[in-house]
Image (cartoon, rainbow, N blue to C red):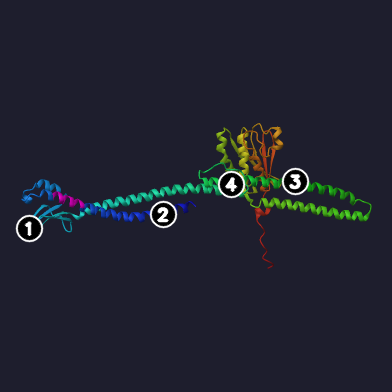
Amino acid sequence: MRRRILVSTLLVVTITALVLGGPLAITTWRLVDDFTRADLTTRLEQVAQRLDDPGGLDAADISAIELAVPPNGRLVLEQTGLPPQVIGADVGPDPVREALPFRPGGQITLEEPLGIMRTQQIQWTLIVLLLVVLSVGTGTVVATLTARRLAEPLSDVADRAARLGAGDFRSAPHRHGIPELDRVSDVLDTSAAALSELVQRERDLVGDVSHQMRSRLTALQLRLDELASHPDPSARREAVAALEQAERLSGVLDELLEAARAARASGAELHDLRDWLTAVADEWRPAARSMGRTFKVRVPEGLLARVTPARIREAIGALVDNAIQHGGGTITLSARSAENSILIEVADGGAGVPEELVPHVFDRGVSVGSSTGLGLALARALVEADGGRLELSKARPAVFTIFLPAARADDVVGPPRPSSGPR
């Protein structure tokens, strides 16, 4: 985008410089010629006024006439019946010449070397061309600044849209001072809030429905277990058959929930958490240092997890920011392996979460300080979008734990190669 804006602007500036610079250079060349000849004509008129004395050149003020002759120029007075009278040296071949009639049959001619005029023409034409080049250079600088001014906000808006598509629903308060792009940013923030609420309602609905269905299925299975021990053989057979159907329905429910989690985490990829979490810590370490806090990272090598980088990066960023703003002491970002899971913990040495806020710490609008209370809610939504889970594992001091799916065997080893058949 930046290159396209820059090239188009430079193309317009270059075309304008060529269209205007060429004719301007030609006009300057001709103007120098016209000014030179006009100067010679003016000098001839001054000489003619000095020669009004009937005695001609001999009776005139020779010194005053010599002043009217340009440097390296020559004045020739031609009169009927008299030899030509000359003031000045030879001006060489093809000089710049202007003549003025003098008395009946006479003529005054003033000449100047052509090289003097050509030198002036070249000098002034070069000045004009230099100004054209300067204008192109100025246009290049302006085009570069304009391209940067437009491209960087567009890139920021594109990145914001990409993060929104990746599940990052946090608002971006930064604006660029361009009304149209700021309007797009406002719309993206509004859309992010609406999508966040929609996704959260959907997850709550799925969780509530699955919980209710599991409760009803459990109650139904218990009743069918009782019926399976009924003394009537026909009733017992029907109860066993119904119990099998209930178990199948429970399996289908588990498969649907697993498919929903897999669909949300469809963009997850296998990543080594050590380098990745170290980069996240480096990003937040200056903010912690500005608050007089230290930042530690404890991640073993070879720890692999399936994550979507944009989502988990923003989720961990929200947890670290929460620890910086509301916690105290050393901030620790650690990761370890557990059974079928990878645990990422963000802890600090502060006073922790007040007892009354522990059940609601992930609710929207709940905050200890003056913040918006959206960070932890969005962090949980981002982690859940990758099929993970975010919990407050310890309230005082606060320890937040992210449970992520561990790498599967086929992730590390790779799918088996197709058999080439019997040999």
The x, y position of residue 408, in whole percent, is 68, 52
Q: How far apart are marks 3 and 4 (CA)?
A: 31 Å
Q: Where is residue 110 in the image (x, y as percent from the top left)?
A: 15, 53
* Residue, disc 1: 80
Q: Give the range drawn in magenta.
A: 38-47
Q: Nearer the viewer, mark 1 or mark 4?
A: 1
Q: In which quarter of the image is the C terminus?
A: bottom right
Q: How crowded is mark 1: few (under 14 residues within 10 Å), some or many (20 or more)?
A: few
Numbered disc 4: secondary structure: helix
Query: Among all residues in the image, which is located at the extreme right?
Result: 231
Query: Farthest bottom residue?
Result: 423
Task: Tell me how far mark 4 sits from mark 2, CA to CA.
Answer: 33 Å
Q: Residue furthest front?
A: 104
- The mark found on residue 246 in the picture is none
Q: For marks 2 and 3, give the CA distance.
A: 62 Å
Q: How far apart are marks 2 and 1 (CA)?
A: 63 Å
Residue at image point 62% right, 40% down:
318
Q: Can residue 116 be seen in this view?
A: no
Which is more N-terminal, label 3 or label 2?
Answer: 2
